[in-house]
Image (cartoon, rainbow, N blue to C red):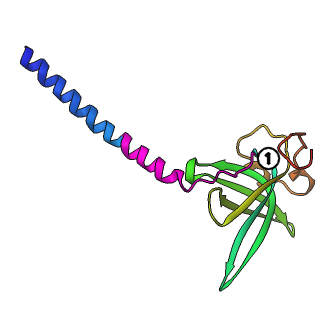
Amino acid sequence: MAAGAASDNEERAMAKKATTGKTNKGRLLRDVEAKSLRKDIPYFEIGDTVDVRCRIVEGDKERVQVFTGTVIARKGSGINEMITVRRIVANEGVERIFPIHSPNVLDIKPVRSGKVRRAKLYFLRQRTGKAVRLAHRHSDHSTTS
């Protein structure tokens, strides 16, 4: 019986080593991604109105474009974190998805806080006119409080 128990322990040790290898891969990925993560991201929440300054390259020219809208979704984590910003232009809804840690996103500036009770505001897509507006929530993290 002692020989059987020893082989069981060896099998457990081998299985433990196999799973630790996966953890090392995850740790390695995290370390590599950490170098590309931005440290200057301001605090903002779903429902907040934000100014997103993004770099636009057209041929050999480069310019900065500001996209102002309401954050309707935030998804992902780490380097894959993205926000969806929606605004109305000429009675058409325009949504853009911005990777937060992208070098093309120069700056995200919270302008106004919105009072919401959902994590995703996809219901705003069906609303038009004044119904799209969210109630203002007085907060410290926006520029106008």
- The residue depicted at 77 percent of the width and 58 percent of the height is 86
Give the residue at mark 1.
47
Q: Is residue 5 left or right of residue 109?
A: left
Residue 49: give x, y in percent of width and height.
83, 52
Residue 21: give x, y in percent of width and height.
31, 41
- The residue depicted at 85 percent of the width and 45 percent of the height is 113
Residue 91: give x, y in percent of width and height.
86, 66
- Image quarter (top left, top right, bottom left or bottom right) of the N terminus: top left
Q: SS at mark 1? A: loop
- The residue depicted at 7 percent of the width and 19 percent of the height is 3
Q: Is residue 5 left or right of residue 103?
A: left
Indicate yes or no whether the magenta region holds residue 39.
yes
Looking at the image, is 69 positioned above or below residue 3? below
Kind of residue indicated by mark 1: Gly
Looking at the image, is 62 positioned above or below residue 87? below
Q: State the image quarter where residue 141 is shown.
A: top right
Boundaries of the magenta span? 23-43
Residue 94: give x, y in percent of width and height.
77, 64
Q: Residues within 10 Å of mark 1 (few under 14, many from 20)?
A: many
